[in-house]
Image (tube, rainbow, N blue to C red):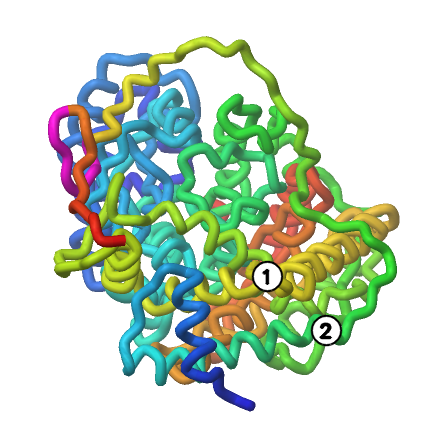
Amino acid sequence: MNELTKEEVLHVADLAKIEVDENDIIKYKVELKQIMNQIDLINKVNIDEEEILISPSNNKNIYREDVFVNEDVDILKNAPKSNGNYIEIKRFLNE
Amino acid sequence: MSNYLDLSIKEINKKLINKEIKPLDLVMECFNRIEENKEYNTFITLDKENAIKKAKELENKEVDNLLFGIPIAIKDNIITKNLKTTCASKILSNFIPTYDATVIKKIKEKNMIIIGKLNMDEFAMGSTNETSYYGNVLNSYDKERVSGGSSGGSAVAVSRGIVPFSLGSDTGGSIRQPAAFNGVVGLKPTYGRISRYGLVAFASSLDQIGPFSRNVYENALLLNILCGKDEKDLTSSDTNEDFTRLIGEKIDGMKIAVPNFYMSDVVNKEIKNNIENIIELLKDNNVKVEYVDIDYVEYAVPLYQIIALAEASSNLARFDGVRYGYQTDKEVSSIDEMYKYTRKEGFGEEVKRRMMIGSYVLSGKNAKTYYYKALKIRKKISDSFQKLFEEYDLVIGPTTTDFAGKFNEGINDATKSFNDDLFTIPVNMAGLPGMSIKIGEGKNKLPIGLQIIGNKFDEAKMYKLASFIEKEVGGKIC
């Protein structure tokens, strides 16, 4: 199979929270499959050991005192809509 | 108009100290050159007013370091307080950061002057700069060709002489590949060498910020001020040192490995010949050069498609149209629909594809089949390199398989942007430092890049070899 099915495209688009229309589906069926075919190459590899590498650095937890630090950052500055001290979004009641 | 920007940093520094020139002269030259090179489309946002203001302020300050008053431009995924930072995306087209990235703080502390924000592939996803919402960047050597990416603007701005320095970021080759395509020096430092605080995250376990420059020595100068521990990035390392210290030292006795994988038939013949000439040059100078195999390195591209995209799908989940960035105007009936339309309209094609693949490899059973399996192979690649560095000082090979291509070559192939990074991705997987320097030009007059890969935190040694080769091939020493 050199294409994903429509259902498969809709599934991954839903996972990624991206709306797709009919034209997108036609395109992604082929394009996503091209990448997935290449990803499948790793199935050829057999590794018995369970060791994994998540990050190249040796991450260690760093603890700090639990004190309030005022960073003076205006978090509302870039919100598309805000009202006083709140970020505003549309009302959704019919879930 | 003067041409002080063509002088070496040391010479400029001398003239600044002697008060022969002022920082403002350099800044005005930059903006003239931006105008002259407008068609290359290197910048997304210019910061002329503040740059001039800063330059004037510096007139009353003592010139206390080599980078004082020197102009620099910044890739547009590194956040700059009060200066628009778009990641070359529609979704951040109005984003004004409220704080500075750690590297920006460091640059400002040394009184370098930020000229503006550079064009790039959207969210650093791409290898040609064609995924930018703000249009293509043209190759510095041939306007019909791509600049490479994702740090295309960073490479071309330095190559065209607009600025002596720029910053880029490298997740799978995004500094080294455009550096090779535009004949400049680009370094991806060791993972953890430079704080990532304020770099808009793409794949957090692979991303690194790094310097672009005209020559090797000046690259080391900039790295000197960028590195160090940052309490805001727990992966950063406390490793301050002078990276210029080995430049000019003899290279005889060094041991260098050339991976067979990097010299296979996929490499353009002319590029391969140029690399072989470098190998001969090194041998003539009493360097031991040997061909080696690196286990599992051939899986680097699918590994990247899994690991980088999985991390990206998670990192880019924050773009929801609520707290910052673009929000859809569509009449929507649920919060989910609001997210979905915002992201459909706000992101470009490459980014959307990558987020879908990333979500897929992490979902349900796939997490084990793909993501976890990829982490096992990643461990093996990292081990292979570590074993190699027990015996060799450095690894060399071509930066890219081919010369810079023309526009739209990847239009029917969603895997092209990954395959372009065949030789650069393994370095990110293992967290190693890698750099590209120009070693010559093809018959087509396009530059050829040599990649030098070092063990973790061995940048000084890489600069030593790079500066030797640069001198031998008649590179731009300034």
Instruction: Give the amino acid type for the residue marked by disc 1 in the picture.
Output: Gly
Residue B320 as seen in the image, left or right of residue B243: left
Q: Position of residue B178 (x, y in %)?
A: 45, 60
Residue B171 shows up from this direction: yes
Quadrant containing the N terminus of chain A is bottom right
In the image, residue A78 lies in the stretch drawn in magenta: yes
| Dot 1 alpha-carbon crowd within 10 angstroms: few under 14, some 14 to 19, many 20 or more | few
Do callouts 2 and 1 point to residues on the same chain? no
Look at the image and tell me whether residue B450 can be seen.
no
Residue at label 2? A43
- Kindly indicate the quadrant of the structure image that contains residue B73: top left
Span highlighted in magenta in the image: A77-84
Query: Where is residue A5 drawn, in percent x and y?
Result: 46, 84
* Amino acid carrying mark 2 in the image: Asn
Residues under labels 2 and 1: Cα distance? 17 Å
Circle 2 chain: A
- Residue at the spot of label 1: B364
Q: Would residue B261 appear left or right of B421 to someone viewing this image?
A: right
Pinpoint residue A2: horizontal percent, then vertical percent.
52, 89
Please report the residue visible at 46 percent of the width from the left and 9 percent of the height from the top.
A67
